[in-house]
Amino acid sequence: MTHKYRFLTCSVLAAMLFSASPAMAKEGDWILRVRAIDVIPTEESGDILPGFPGEQVSVNDSIMPEVDITYMASDNIGIELIAATTKHNASGKSGVTGSLDKLASTWVLPPTLTVQYHFAPDAKVRPYVGAGINYTLFYAEDASSALEAAVGATRVNLSDSFGWAAQAGVDIELNERMFLNLDVKYIDIDTTARLDTTAAGTQRVRISLDPVVVGIGLGIKL
């Protein structure tokens, strides 16, 4: 068992063994969560066109903090707004662009709104599922030095995205107000990257990022 999974297992056991009276979230309550998240793209890339047919890109993972706020519309129904921003690199996978490795970087801001169903609001271990919508903004896009050395000054732009999101998680009480939270989300994110280069003209590549977002953190009933 790796250190990562030992830590996770110990955290869950500690939460279950040393809990006090339930930190139950009831209708009208507000909940604040802070998580560490790993954003793992499951990307599918089109070709870089028109100049590099058959050449595609990959996108790296990113670990960052996340904050969300939940309003309990009833004992079982929560409405959650998720906010986090992460930085990702796009790299060539083969051919000429693959030899350059990193092609560009971008920051991603994907505010996501989900409606959750909490199965056991009165229990110490409270699983939930959710579904909702997402709007993703890309900002601070930047061409890599390797790309600009190959094709000259380059301007990078990624189109914003609108899609759906799915979520599953569990809250495990720690005391009357705080709880441990484990959460997994899938977010539908599609974008077109446009590279306006000096030597190779305008190149475009369609990317479906579709990340899985794995998080662990703490929540507090406000």
Image (cartoon, rainbow, N blue to C red):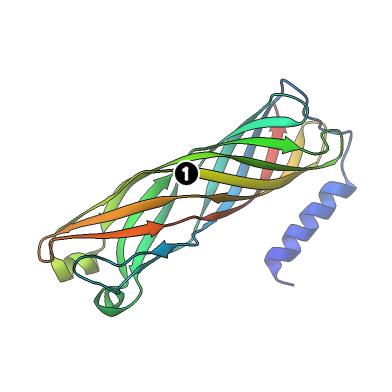
Q: Which residue is mark 1?
A: 163
Q: Residue at x 27, y 74 (%)?
A: 100
Relative depth, front residue between 31 and 138: 138
Residue 28: x, y in percent?
71, 20
Picture quarter containing residue 77?
A: top right
Q: Residues within 10 Å of mark 1 (few under 14, many from 20)?
A: some
Q: Residue 129: percent from the left, percent from the top?
A: 70, 43
Q: Amino acid at mark 1?
A: Gly
The answer to whether residue 222 is left or right of residue 139 is right
Count all numbered tags in the image, as a single digit: 1
Which percent across, then down, holds residue 34?
62, 41
Using residue 96 as the reference point, say whether residue 207 is left or right of it: right
Q: Nearer the viewer, residue 143 or 196?
A: 196
User: Quarter holding the N terminus?
Assistant: bottom right
Residue 153 horizontal side relative to residue 165, left or right: left
The residue sitting at the left extreme is 199
Q: Position of residue 98 (x, y in %)?
A: 31, 76
- Identified at 32% across, 72% down, the residue is 101
Q: Is residue 182 depicted above or below 73 in this figure?
A: below
Q: Is residue 65 above or below residue 206?
A: above
Q: Is residue 133 above or below residue 50?
A: above
Label 1 sits on a secondary structure element that is: strand
Q: Which quadrant, please, contains the C terminus?
A: top right
Relative to residue 34, is residue 187 depicted above or below?
Answer: below
